[in-house]
């Protein structure tokens, strides 16, 4: 007994204190450990670029991992769903503010927009770089969870106050447009200046979120048509500017169109064949196809069990192996088995997310968990498909594994929210079981006692039955 008590007071009591979904806890901790090992093995090129050492990079990753774990625990310890609901309402404002700073290209207070890889996607704040799209995707999922819940319950406070004086604001369609569709379009329009692929991915996740939240496909038909019209207008603006000899406004949209119209890598292969080695056109075309082809080589060379930790060769060829091609690196070093383990982790997250959603009795919580899980697993699947050459390069990292401070921290917040809501759902189930258990046990005892009495009566030992009354039993 003393030994059992000591064991409970030690590690197992600590492990048992985690009340959220333990499978999700296991998934996020395993992803973090994989990240530390993979970043350390794949950062030789990163160290070369930054003029630093691998140990400095691993220390940075350990620091970011610790900070991410702190964020998870912080969100996990929020015990009231109302706190998430209040904070979620800021999601749209945060997204628009960050995108507006990027669009201005001007320093505003401590916020300084930076152009990286010919795109405005990053804001520097006191030396720390914030990848705006990583913040926007999580913030908007939480905002839309609040918006569809408020629409369902008709709890838009400002619109309802305005409707008392102006009936126009009380219309169902107006509330949908103002609180749901307009925020999505404004955010997508702001992101289109920096990345078409991110716009399409994040926009798709936002539409899936509101669909899961109960907005019917019939109601989504008009917004989808409007999105197509807006995309067509942007393409038209670009074409007019190009014909007039000007730089297109939506440069990344034009680049995506050029890749599609030029049949992707085949176009660059033809340029390589037609130009002399070392020429400018030859080198530009080679740079365009070097990364995806090297990723394919990494996957091919990995085989079943991989080359082993630290033995990757393609990390010296692909400059961003530790970001956009992390899955290829994992397969090269750990083989198909390592890739399958990563797939299992994300697949398990999707399955556990579905279980958590089913056990939630709060509509906002259901939509928030569904949206965040779809975001994490959707981005992981997109990253993996691109790495195995089944899609165009989009720049999406492998959640909680790839190098990227903003991405890691925002996904940590997403995991923390999922774990907090799973904790609330688990407590609700436990309370219901606790209430039901005494009734069940009492019923079992009564049935068992009655069956024993019947056995005694039929065997002729009715004198052994306590408080027997013959009138209690009737025979034909």
Image: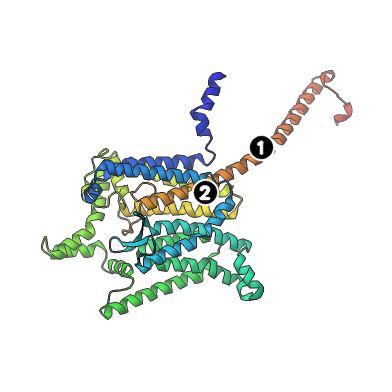
Indicate the position of residue 399 as horizontal and vertical percent values.
39, 49
Q: Are marks 1 and 2 in contact (CB under 8 Å)?
A: no
* 104 to 407, vertically: above or below: below
Of residues 390 and 242, which is closer to you in this image? Answer: 242
Find numbered disc 2 in the image and state the secondary structure of the residue it sits on.
helix
In the picture, the quarter occupied by the N terminus is top right
Indicate the position of residue 436 as horizontal and vertical percent values.
69, 38
Q: Decide if residue 453 is on the left or right side of residue 267.
A: right
Report the coloring of the rendering: rainbow
* 128 to 341, vertically: above or below: below
Measured Cα–Cα span from mark 1 to mark 2: 24 Å
From this viewpoint, is residue 332 visible?
no
Residue 434's disc is 1
Dot 1: few (<14), some (14–19), or many (≥20) neighbours within 10 Å? few
Dot 2: few (<14), some (14–19), or many (≥20) neighbours within 10 Å? some
Of residues 121 and 462, which is closer to you in this image? Answer: 121
Comes first in the chain, label 1 or label 2:
2
From this viewpoint, is residue 327 visible?
yes
Indicate the position of residue 223 as horizontal and vertical percent values.
49, 70
Residue 354's disc is 2
Q: Decide if residue 452 is on the left or right side of residue 183.
A: right
Residue at the image point whose x is 41% and y is 45% from the top: 67
Of residues 455 and 216, which is closer to you in this image? Answer: 216
Q: Residue furthest front?
A: 109
Q: Decide if residue 250 is on the left or right side of residue 135.
A: left
Of badges 1 and 2, the one in the foreground is 1
Count up the numbered dots. Answer: 2
């Amino acid at each position: 007994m003393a030994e059992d008590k000591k064991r409970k007071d030690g590690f197992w009591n600590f492990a048992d204190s985690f009340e959220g979904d333990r499978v999700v806890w296991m998934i996020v901790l395993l992803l973090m450990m994989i990240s530390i090992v993979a970043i350390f093995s794949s950062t030789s090129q990163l160290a070369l670029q930054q003029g630093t050492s691998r140990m400095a990079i691993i220390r940075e990753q350990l620091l970011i991992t610790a900070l991410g774990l702190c964020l998870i625990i912080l969100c996990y310890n929020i015990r009231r769903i109302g706190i998430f609901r209040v904070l979620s309402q800021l999601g749209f404002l945060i997204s628009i503010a960050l995108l507006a700073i990027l669009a201005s290209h001007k320093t505003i207070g401590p916020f300084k927009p930076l152009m990286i890889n010919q795109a405005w996607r990053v804001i520097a704040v006191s030396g720390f770089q914030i990848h705006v799209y990583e913040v926007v995707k999580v913030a908007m999922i939480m905002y839309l969870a609040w918006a569809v819940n408020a629409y369902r319950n008709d709890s838009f406070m400002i619109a309802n106050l305005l409707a008392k004086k102006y009936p126009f604001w009380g219309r169902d369609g107006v509330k949908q447009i103002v609180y749901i569709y307009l925020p999505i379009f404004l955010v997508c329009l702001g992101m289109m200046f920096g990345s078409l692929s991110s716009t399409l991915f994040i926009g798709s996740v936002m539409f899936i979120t509101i669909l899961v939240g109960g907005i019917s496909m019939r109601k989504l038909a008009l917004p989808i048509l409007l999105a197509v019209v807006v995309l067509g207008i942007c393409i038209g603006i670009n074409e007019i500017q190009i014909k007039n000899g000007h730089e297109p406004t939506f440069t990344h949209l034009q680049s995506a169109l050029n890749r599609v119209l030029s049949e992707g890598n085949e176009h660059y292969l033809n340029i390589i064949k037609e130009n002399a080695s070392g020429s400018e056109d030859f080198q530009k075309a080679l740079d365009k196809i070097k990364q995806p082809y090297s990723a394919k080589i990494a996957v091919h060379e990995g085989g079943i069990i991989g080359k082993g930790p630290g033995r990757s060769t393609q990390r010296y060829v692909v400059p961003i192996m530790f970001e956009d091609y992390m899955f290829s690196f994992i397969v090269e070093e750990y083989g198909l088995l390592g890739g399958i383990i990563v797939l299992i982790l994300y697949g398990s997250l999707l399955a556990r997310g579905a279980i958590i959603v089913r056990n939630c009795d709060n509509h906002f919580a259901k939509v928030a968990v569904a949206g965040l899980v779809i975001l994490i697993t959707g981005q992981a699947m997109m990253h993996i498909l691109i790495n195995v050459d089944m899609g165009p390069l989009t720049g999406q990292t492998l959640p909680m594994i790839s190098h990227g401070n903003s991405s890691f921290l925002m996904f940590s917040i997403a995991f923390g929210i999922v774990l907090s809501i799973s904790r609330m759902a688990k407590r609700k189930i436990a309370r219901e079981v606790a209430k039901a258990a005494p009734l069940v046990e009492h019923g079992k005892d009564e049935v068992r006692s009655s069956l024993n009495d019947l056995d005694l009566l039929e065997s002729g030992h009715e004198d052994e039955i306590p408080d027997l009354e013959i009138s209690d039993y009737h025979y034909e």
